[in-house]
Amino acid sequence: MAITDAPPLEVGASKPIRPGRKQRLTGRRIMPWLFLAVPLAFLFVLTYIPVANMFWYSVTDWDGLDPEKTLVGLDNYIEIFTRPEIFRVFFVSLFYLAGAIAQLGLALFFAALLSFQTRFRNFFKGVIFFPYLINGVAIGLMFLYFFRPDGTLDAVLGAFGVQETPQWLGDPSVVNVSLAATSVWRYMGLNFVLFLGAIQSVPAEQYEAADLDGASSWHKFRYIIVPSIRRILGLSFILAIAGALSAFEMPYIMTGGANGSETFVIQTVDTAFRYSKVGLASAMAVVLLAIVLIITAVQRRVFPDEKADQE
Amino acid sequence: MTSTQPREVDVTGMPVGDFPASSSPVITTSRRRLPAGAAVGTIGKYASLIVACLFALIPIGTIFMLAFKTSEEYRGTGPLVPPSDWLNFDNFVIAFTQGDMIIGFVNTGIILVISITGTVLIGTMAAYAIDRFRFRGRSLVSGLFLLATLVPSVTTQVATFQVINALDLFNTRWSAILLFTGTDIVAIYIFLQFMQSIPISLDEAAMLDGANRFTVYWRIILPLLKPAVATVVIIKGIAVYNEFYIPFLYMPSQDLGVISTSLFRFMGPFGAQWEVIAAGTILVIVPTLIAFLFLQRFIYNGLTSGATK
């Protein structure tokens, strides 16, 4: 391309071909929409139309089949907030929330450990991270075997002399702890890798300077590592809350929501697809969407875009 | 979700600074201080790393051993006892032939290829339009894409289901393909971020040489986006391979099973044959493990750019 002596685009293009210019401007106006047509069609058909429909269904008593939808006003919403068995499942989220906090703590701990010089560093990193990549159903089956009576967990505990073990997935007072622990096992690796990446993006000179000043490992953690990951930590925390509220896959695969392990999302999809109450289920989905949006708004307020907090 | 996230890009185009592999700024502990305390610290450190590895590996290891046991062995020995014959592949054969795992891998493969191609084309087209054109409605369009990232997809399935039904795609592979392709907004943001680092003078030079916008997109932008495409292919590939609920909901038919749903259906007929379930589980994990071993660096990089959006 012999462009070295080419004048800037505007001058070179406009002078000799005046008549073509108008055509080109029209073309310029249509052109972006040609590129956007398919993406926007998908966006509307698969995201915005469903969301709009969801609001519309949520004020009807539709069963998903009937051609007639009867308006029932806010009845579905009133039902959600007054029938205790619907709203109660939010308490199950507390187990996942506790799990998520433990998960962030563990991820931070191991990320900090591995940010110091370590033998077999890549091996440890890989092993801690790998569970995150495994198929959810495979994890579900693995942990069904892990938690079953005389399964892996009981055998390991037996090796330490613990004989009296509960029904890990059968006892309603234990099941949510077991399921939340499975989620921690599955997702901790992602947080760990994100934290480790953030820590390592700190220039090495900062640590060298700290070494010269005789800083201890704790001081390096407190004054170099923690500030460097503040933003990703905040983001992860918000995502953890949203994730705890919409916990679904592990309990759905492992127990199907039995023994008091039902979460809000399991209840929503069961209401829609098993009990054919699309209206009520849509209202539940709207409630969850509203909660997630509120959490996101709070996040935006508390942790504004990184541009703002970059020194 | 920050489309303007500044990211250093080196010559090869991979984002640097996230996971520099060998030259990473490893923190060196100052060796001259507190030798005794340092020794205790080192022991504690490796002890906790080993415990973490045991936690990560024991659930996988026991299911791996179980996959090689006969049904008598399964009933007679504990989960921590290794199988007597490490070359007993009977369970894998049963899982493969009677458990519809072949169908599962074929369907997953088809869906994977089509939806990844679709995601890349749609994502790059959208990113090209948003980044390279100034037109009325541009900020509205990018706002619409941004807003859509906030909608949790599991819950909208209640209403998405009706759309798929109306399009007559229920119980076809196209339902999953369409949903995987059409709802990946994170991919658009990865492409957007990357495209900002491609100098616009390249486009202009090509257009001076007479190239139209499609040629610029196809011949210049798309090839230069290769590293971002690799990132999207990897995170999308993992997500599609692991997705459970969309195929479960939209493709209930037996011969439309993907690996997730085929494996999920093991729980019925093989409910008492845990050794077969274990073999199926291992069959699903092995491709992931191989991909991880070969693509480690790209996976780590891809996840950081994807997860922080």
Image: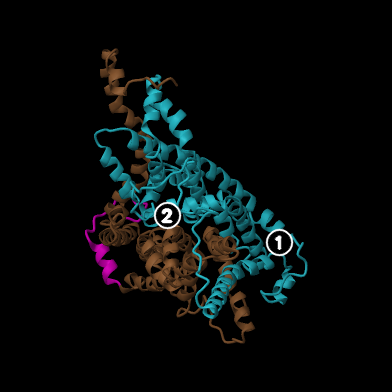
Chain colours: A brown, B cyan
Same chain for mark 2 and mark 1? The answer is yes
Instruction: Report the residue marked by disc 2.
Output: B307
Can you say which quadrant of the picture contains the C terminus of chain A? bottom left
Mark 2 is surrounded, within 10 Å at the Cα level, by few (under 14), some (14 to 19) or many (20 or more) other residues, namely some
- Secondary structure of the residue carrying tag 2 is helix
Instruction: Work out whether residue B261 or residue B145 is closer to the camera in this orientation and state it.
Output: B145
Q: State if disc 1 and disc 2 touch (CB < 8 Å).
A: no
The residue located at (53%, 45%) in the rendering is B112
Question: Could you tell me the amino acid type at mark 1?
Answer: Asn
Chain that bears disc 2: B
Chain that bears disc 1: B
Can you say which quadrant of the picture contains the N terminus of chain A? top left
CA gap between label 2 and label 1 equals: 37 Å
Instruction: Report the residue marked by disc 1.
Output: B91
**Residue A60 placement (x, y as % from top left):** 27, 56
- Residue range of the region highlighted in magenta in the rendering: A62-83
Would you say residue B42 is visible in this rendering? Answer: yes
Question: Could you tell me the amino acid type at mark 2?
Answer: Ala
**Residue B72 placement (x, y as % from top left):** 74, 72
Would you say residue B247 is visible in this rendering? Answer: no
**Residue B185 placement (x, y as % from top left):** 39, 46
B294 sits to left or right of A15: right
The residue located at (59%, 58%) in the rendering is B263
Occupied quadrant, residue A139? bottom right
